[in-house]
Image (cartoon, rainbow, N blue to C red):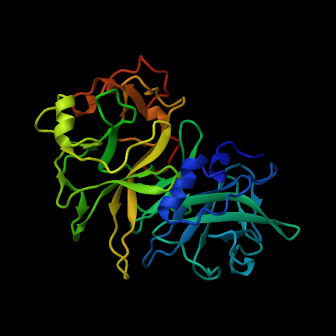
C-alpha cells in the first residue's frame, strides 16, 4: 500500500520541491510517476553526498513496515535518463528486514558509475518487474557541507523533506533530528499594509557571535534566496562583507531603504536594518532560504548550503496573513522551520522585542504541540 508519508516526496513535495531542485543545481527535468499501490514501503532515508575518506557517497534505505523485503536487483540512479547499464544494481540475495536499514555505498562490491554532487543532486530508487524498472521512491537535495548527510523528515502535515541532519551521519541506524542553524528566519512580512514594505527578520539564536560570511574567504557572504515567477532561484539579498550577528541579535532585511523603513516602523536604534531587497516575496507562497557559502571547489565554484528554509503558502494550515497587515512569526527558534505548525500570524516586528508574546500563547490557533517530532534515534 502506498504510504501517505511517501507520496509527497515522490511528487517532489509540490512545486516548492521542484523549485528547490532548480535552486540546488539538481536535474528536475524528470517528474517521476507515483509508484504503484503495491510498491513495497521502502524509502530513501539518508543521503551522504559530500565526502572525504573514510566516508563515501551513500544512500540509506529504510523499510517502513514490519515485513522483510527482497531487494535483489533493485536499482539506484541520479538521473532517470541515464543509460540503464550505469545504474547501481543491488546484488542478488539482498534482504532488508522489517523496520530495518540497508546502505548502498560507492565502494566494493557495488561501485557506482556516477557520484552524488555536494552542490545538490537527486536520487531515484527502482525495483524491477518483468524487466521494467518501477519507481519506488525519489529524493532531491541541495548543497551540503562535509560530512553532513540529508535525512528524510516528515512534517506535521505529512510533507516529506530532505534536510541536513544534526551531528555526523547515522547510516544503518536511526536518524538524528534535523539540523537547526545558528542563524534562522524568525519573521516574514509577505503582504504588508500601506505604507509598510516587505521584510525578513533573521535572528542569531545562540550565545555566540556568528559571521555572515566565510571566515576563510571573507568575500563570500551569506545570501537570502527566493524564487522568481518561473520558480527559479533568485538572490533577494547578498549580505555585505564582514557582517557579524552578536549573540541573540535580530537583523531586518527590508524591501525599502533602511531610512524609509525606520520612518514607518518604530524600532529601537540598536536594531540593524539592511536593504533594499533586490526582489520581493510572493503573497501566494514562496520558498525563502537563508544560505551560507561552502568552501570553494577546485575550479572556484562556490555552492551555497541552506541554513534555514521556509516554503510558506497563503492557504491553511499556514497562518492567514493576507491583506490583514500581519506577518508570519516563528514560534520556536530551535525547531524545524518549514512546517506550518511552527508559525503564527503576528503583529509586525514582534520578533525584535525582548519577549515576543506570540511565543507564549497559543489560544488564537489550533496547532499541534510544538514537541511534535517523529521518533529520532539521537538527540
Residue located at (73% from left, 64% from top): 126
Residue 141, compared with residue 365, is above or below; it is: below
Residue located at (24% from left, 61% from top): 213
Q: Quadrant of residue 92?
A: bottom right
Compared across the picture, whether 371 is left or right of 375 comes to: left
Observer able to see residue 273:
yes
Counting from the top left corner in percent of width and height, residue 235 is at 37, 56
Observer able to see residue 354:
no
Compared across the picture, whether 144 is left or right of 375 comes to: left
Counting from the top left corner in percent of width and height, residue 218 is at 21, 67
Compared across the picture, whether 88 is left or right of 141 comes to: right
> 325 and 113: which one is in front?
325
Residue 167, compared with residue 15, is above or below; it is: below
Q: In which quarter of the image is residue 88?
A: bottom right
> 171 and 157: which one is in front?
157
> 310 and 71: which one is in front?
310
- Most distant residue in the right direction: 130
Counting from the top left corner in percent of width and height, residue 254 is at 27, 42
> 188 and 62: which one is in front?
188
- Most distant residue in the top direction: 363
Counting from the top left corner in percent of width and height, residue 295 is at 32, 72
Amino acid at each position: 500500500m502506498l504510504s501517505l508519508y511517501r507520496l509527497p516526496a515522490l511528487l517532489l513535495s509540490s512545486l516548492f520541491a521542484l523549485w528547490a531542485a532548480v535552486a540546488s543545481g539538481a536535474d528536475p527535468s524528470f517528474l517521476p510517476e507515483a509508484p504503484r499501490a503495491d510498491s513495497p514501503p521502502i524509502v530513501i532515508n539518508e543521503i551522504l553526498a559530500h565526502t572525504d575518506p573514510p566516508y563515501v557517497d551513500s544512500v540509506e534505505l529504510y523499510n517502513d513496515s514490519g515485513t522483510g523485503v527482497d531487494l535483489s536487483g533493485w536499482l539506484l540512479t541520479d538521473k532517470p535518463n541515464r543509460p540503464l547499464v550505469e545504474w547501481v544494481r543491488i546484488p542478488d540475495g539482498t534482504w532488508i528486514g522489517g523496520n530495518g536499514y540497508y546502505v548502498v555505498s560507492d565502494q566494493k562490491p557495488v561501485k557506482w558509475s556516477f557520484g552524488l554532487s555536494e552542490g545538490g543532486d537527486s536520487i531515484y530508487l527502482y525495483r524491477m518487474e518483468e524487466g521494467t524498472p518501477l519507481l519506488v521512491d525519489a529524493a532531491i537535495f541541495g548543497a551540503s557541507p562535509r560530512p553532513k548527510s540529508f535525512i528524510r523528515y516528515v512534517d506535521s502535515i505529512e510533507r516529506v523533506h530532505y534536510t541536513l541532519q544534526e551531528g555526523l551521519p547515522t547510516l544503518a541506524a536511526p536518524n538524528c533530528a534535523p539540523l537547526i542553524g545558528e542563524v534562522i528566519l524568525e519573521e516574514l512580512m509577505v503582504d504588508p499594509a500601506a505604507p509598510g514594505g516587505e521584510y525578513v527578520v533573521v535572528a542569531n539564536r545562540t550565545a555566540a557571535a556568528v559571521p555572515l560570511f566565510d571566515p576563510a574567504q571573507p568575500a563570500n557572504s551569506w545570501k537570502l534566496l527566493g524564487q522568481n515567477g518561473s520558480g527559479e532561484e533568485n538572490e533577494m539579498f547578498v549580505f555585505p562583507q564582514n557582517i557579524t550577528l552578536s549573540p541573540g541579535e535580530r537583523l531586518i532585511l527590508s524591501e525599502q531603504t533602511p531610512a524609509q523603513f525606520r520612518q514607518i516602523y518604530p524600532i529601537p536604534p540598536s536594531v540593524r536594518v539592511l536593504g533594499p531587497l533586490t526582489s520581493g516575496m510572493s503573497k501566494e507562497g514562496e520558498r525563502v532560504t537563508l544560505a551560507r557559502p561552502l568552501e570553494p571547489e577546485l575550479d572556484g565554484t562556490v555552492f551555497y548550503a541552506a541554513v534555514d528554509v521556509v516554503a510558506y503558502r497563503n492557504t491553511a494550515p499556514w497562518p492567514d496573513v493576507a491583506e490583514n497587515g500581519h506577518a508570519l512569526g516563528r514560534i520556536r527558534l530551535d525547531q524545524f522551520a518549514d512546517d506550518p505548525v511552527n508559525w503564527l500570524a503576528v503583529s509586525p516586528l514582534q520578533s525584535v522585542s525582548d519577549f515576543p508574546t506570540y511565543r507564549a500563547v497559543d489560544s488564537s490557533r489550533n496547532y499541534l504541540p510544538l514537541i511534535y517530532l517523529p521518533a529520532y534515534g539521537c538527540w
